[in-house]
Amino acid sequence: GFVACRALSQRCDEPQRASRPWDKNRDGFVMGEGAGVLVMESLEHAMARGANIIAEYVGGAVTCDAHHMTDPHPDGLGVSTCIKLALEDGGVDPDAVNYINAHATSTLVGDIAEVKAIKKVLTNTGNIKMNATKSMIGHCLGAAGGMEAIATIQAIRTGWVHPTINHEDPIDEVQDINVVPNMKQEHNINVGISNSFGFGGHNSVVAFAPFKA
C-alpha cells in the first residue's frame, strides 16, 4: 500500500540519509520499528507515593478532517484545529509553547502542511525549537505517537532537544523556525507539544510541561 501510493523514500542505496524532513530533497518516509509506553497517573496518586514526576500532561485533542485518503489538507486545516483544541484543553496560551516534536515524516505534502498548520496557531515561531524524531528512527507507524511523546518528555527532563538529521537544504517554510539541524541543542522548555497524524485525516496533539510543585 505505501509503495502504491508512493509514500516511501526511494533512497535505498543510502538508507541512513533517506529520512530528511523539511529538506528540499526529501522523497518520502522510511519505515521504522519500535514501541513506546507511557505511564500516567493522577497528581494526587503520584505525590502520595513520593513519585519522581518528570513531566505534566497538560492537554490533548483528536480531530479528523477526512480531506483525502492519504494526504492532509494542503493548508493544514485539520491539524491547526487539533493544535488549537489541545492547547485550549490545557488552558495553554499559544505563546507559551516553545518546543514541538513534529510529525514530520519526510513526505512532500505532509511536511509543508504541518508547518502551515503550526504557523496558523503558533505565531511566535522565533522562540520555538522544532525537531523530527523520524529523521533518526523512521516512521514507526502506530508506535510513532507514543515514542515521540516520550521524546518530548525526555527533552523536558534533560533540557536537550535531539537534532533533525539529514537537514541540508531546508524548504522555505521552515526558514524562520529553528528545526535543530543536525546537532542537538539545549532548551528550557515551557510547554512542548507532540504531533501525530495518520492517513484519512486523523490528527492528534498532546501537550506536556515541566512539573512545578
Image: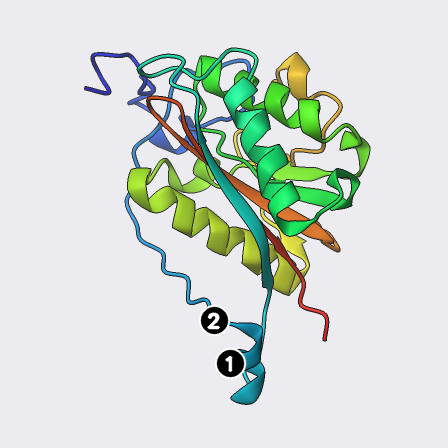
79 w.r.t. 182: above or below: above
Q: Quadrant of residue 8?
A: top left
In this rendering, would 171 be left or right of 73? Answer: right
**Whether residue 206 can be seen here:** no
Q: Quadrant of residue 169?
A: top right
Residue wearing tag 2? 41
- For the residue pair 194 and 77, the one nearer the viewer reads as 77
Q: Secondary structure at mark 1?
A: helix
Residue wearing tag 1? 45
Q: Are marks 2 and 1 in contact (CB under 8 Å)?
A: yes
Q: Quadrant of residue 196?
A: top left
**Whether residue 62 can be seen here:** yes
Q: Residues within 10 Å of mark 1 (few under 14, many from 20)?
A: few
Residue at x 51%, y 72% (from the top left corner): 42
Q: Residue 188, image x and y in percent?
A: 75, 55
Residue at x 48%, y 13% (from the top left corner): 73
- For the residue pair 163 and 85, the one nearer the viewer reads as 85
Q: Secondary structure at mark 2?
A: loop
Which residue type does callout 1 highlight?
His
Residue at x 80%, y 32% (from the top left corner): 124
Residue at x 58%, y 42% (from the top left corner): 86
In this rendering, would 21 be left or right of 189? Answer: left
Q: Residue 155, image x and y in percent?
A: 61, 55
